[in-house]
Amino acid sequence: MVSRASDTLPAMPDRPVLELFLGDVIELRRPHACGASTWLVDRLGADIGLRCRSCGRHVLLTRRTVESRLAAFIERGDAAMSEAARPDKARSA
């Protein structure tokens, strides 16, 4: 019998996906090495791009990691800008 990759994956959680926008400023539970805890969301997808508000360092974290480490939203970004930047959005010519 052939085993499929989908048979070995863990079940999807029942909670909804956290809605993030480009330009969101978030606070994570653990501080960065520079001592700051606030981050700017500058990339969305399976990996979330975060830029430290103190030192400017850029990191990529999985969406699951960001969801588990999120402490609070400091400032919300623009939903329209996030929608316009979606790569899977069909573009009409």
Image (tube, helix red, strand yellow):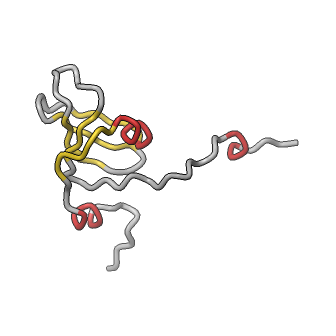
Q: Who is closer to the viewer here, 52 or 87?
A: 52
Quadrant placement of the C terminus: bottom left
Which corner quadrant of the image does residue 79 belong to?
A: bottom left
Residue 82 is situated, as x and y percent measured from the top left of the image, at 27, 61
Residue 57 is situated, as x and y percent measured from the top left of the image, at 19, 30
Q: Who is closer to the viewer here, 92 or 69?
A: 69
Quadrant placement of the N terminus: top right
Q: Is residue 60 left or right of residue 1?
A: left
Q: Is residue 20 left or right of residue 4?
A: left
Q: Residue at x 70, y 39 (%)?
A: 8
Residue 7 is situated, as x and y percent measured from the top left of the image, at 73, 44
Q: Is residue 34 left or right of residue 4?
A: left
What residue occupies the far right of the structure in this picture? 1
Work out whether 64 lies above or below 32.
below
What residue occupies the far top of the structure in this picture? 33
Q: Who is closer to the viewer here, 82 or 36?
A: 36
Count of marks placed on residues: 0
Work out whether 75 lies above or below 3.
below
Q: Residue at x 21, y 38 (%)?
A: 39
Q: Residue at x 40, y 37 (%)?
A: 68
Q: Residue at x 29, y 38 (%)?
A: 71
Residue 21 is situated, as x and y percent measured from the top left of the image, at 27, 55
What residue occupies the far left of the structure in this picture? 54
Which corner quadrant of the image does residue 64 belong to?
A: top left
Which corner quadrant of the image does residue 56 belong to?
A: top left
